[in-house]
């Protein structure tokens, strides 16, 4: 999504001649040449926002309106089946064959890829956290429930839920969270789920760094439930110092008031709860909460 802006300078040469009127002598003014400016090196500017998956097709239509929904005949069943066949073929890492059906290994990656594939087919689609709405006009939309509570993929008519008249999505546009000085564009998540953490070691080392560099935010003498789970005496400072320590390692990070959010790219972000209700540092596997796709800031 990066755009490159190139600046170039042009050189012009002007030759001026002046002729005298009182005698036959002619005085010529020497040519004045402007030295060509050195071309500025290319500069890379980041777009302020990453597009939400499905945004291209949905840009043609208006927002959702209140109406009524009923189980009818789905319009987009063929699109759903075709996209699922394509994902199973191209992204087999997203699925696990359980014998009784395909289990979706990463619901976040699945829904982002699903919306992107529908977008490529010209179908406006959005995920509301439970169902996927699909439309090609503002007159109506179909609703599909793609994954069971056990993360088993639904296929065929069993995934269809209802058709709404008029189209009930999209709802109010969510604002992009502040990116806290991150050099990546702003991003916003489609969905989040608990997976295996990628950035846990970065968070753990950041906490160790804060303990070394800012001992004033801890009470090391207080009894802790485990080694390294220091008592926090200034939670706000602790949260801010951990964020800055993570940023110093080349990652993007912010604290949303409840969880620490970390990303290294806009494909996903990870969320951590780094303090306990009792006021101690929380670390290790227990601090990880979820992974969001795309990144949540």
Image (cartoon, grey):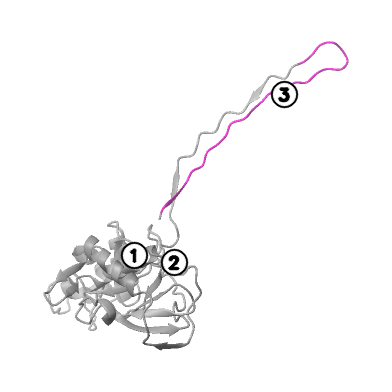
- Which residue corresponds to the image point at 36% horizontal and 84% vertical from the top-left? 162
Which residue is disc 2 drawn over? 57
Label 1: how many Cα within 10 Å (few below 14, some 14–19, many 20+): many
C-alpha distance separating marks 3 and 1 = 64 Å
**Compared to 142, does 5 lie above or below?**
above
Q: What label does residue 231 carry, if any?
A: none
Furthest-top residue in this view: 24
| Location of mark 1 (residue) | 117
Quarter of the figure that contains the N terminus: bottom left
**Residue 229 makes an appearance in the image:** no
- Mark earlier in primary sequence (3, 1): 3
Coordinates of residue 250 in the picture (x, y in percent): 29, 56
- Place of residue 209 in the rendered image (x, y in percent of width and height, measured from the top left): 23, 62
Whole-percent x, y for residue 182 in the image: 37, 60
The image's mark for residue 16 is 3
Other residues around mark 2 within 10 Å, as few (<14) / some (14–19) / many (≥20):
some
């Amino acid at each position: 999504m990066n755009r490159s802006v190139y600046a170039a300078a042009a050189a012009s040469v002007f030759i001026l001649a002046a002729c005298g009127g009182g005698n036959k002598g002619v005085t010529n003014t020497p040519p004045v040449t402007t030295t060509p400016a050195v071309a500025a090196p290319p500069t890379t500017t980041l777009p302020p926002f990453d597009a939400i998956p499905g945004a291209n097709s949905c840009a043609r239509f208006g927002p959702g309106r209140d109406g009524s929904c009923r189980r009818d005949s789905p319009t987009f069943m063929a699109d759903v089946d075709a996209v699922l066949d394509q994902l199973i073929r191209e992204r087999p890492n997203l699925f696990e064959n359980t014998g009784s059906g395909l289990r979706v290994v990463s619901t976040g990656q699945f829904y982002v890829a699903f919306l992107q594939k529908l977008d490529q087919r010209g179908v406006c689609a959005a995920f509301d956290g439970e169902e996927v709405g699909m439309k090609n006009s503002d007159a109506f939309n179909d609703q599909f429930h793609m994954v069971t509570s056990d993360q088993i993929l639904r296929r065929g008519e069993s995934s269809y839920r209802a058709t709404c008249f008029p189209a009930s999505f999209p709802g109010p546009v969510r604002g992009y969270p502040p990116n806290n000085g991150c050099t990546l564009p702003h991003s916003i998540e489609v969905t989040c789920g608990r997976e295996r953490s990628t950035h846990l070691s970065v968070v753990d080392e950041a906490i160790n760094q804060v303990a070394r560099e800012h001992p004033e935010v801890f009470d090391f003498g207080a009894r802790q439930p485990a080694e390294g789970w220091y008592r926090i005496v200034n939670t706000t400072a602790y949260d801010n110092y951990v964020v800055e320590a993570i940023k110093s390692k080349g990652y993007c990070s912010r604290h949303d008031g409840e969880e620490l959010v970390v990303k290294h790219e806009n494909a996903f972000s990870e969320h951590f709860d780094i303090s306990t209700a009792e006021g101690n540092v929380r670390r290790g596997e227990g601090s990880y909460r979820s992974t969001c796709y795309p990144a949540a800031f």
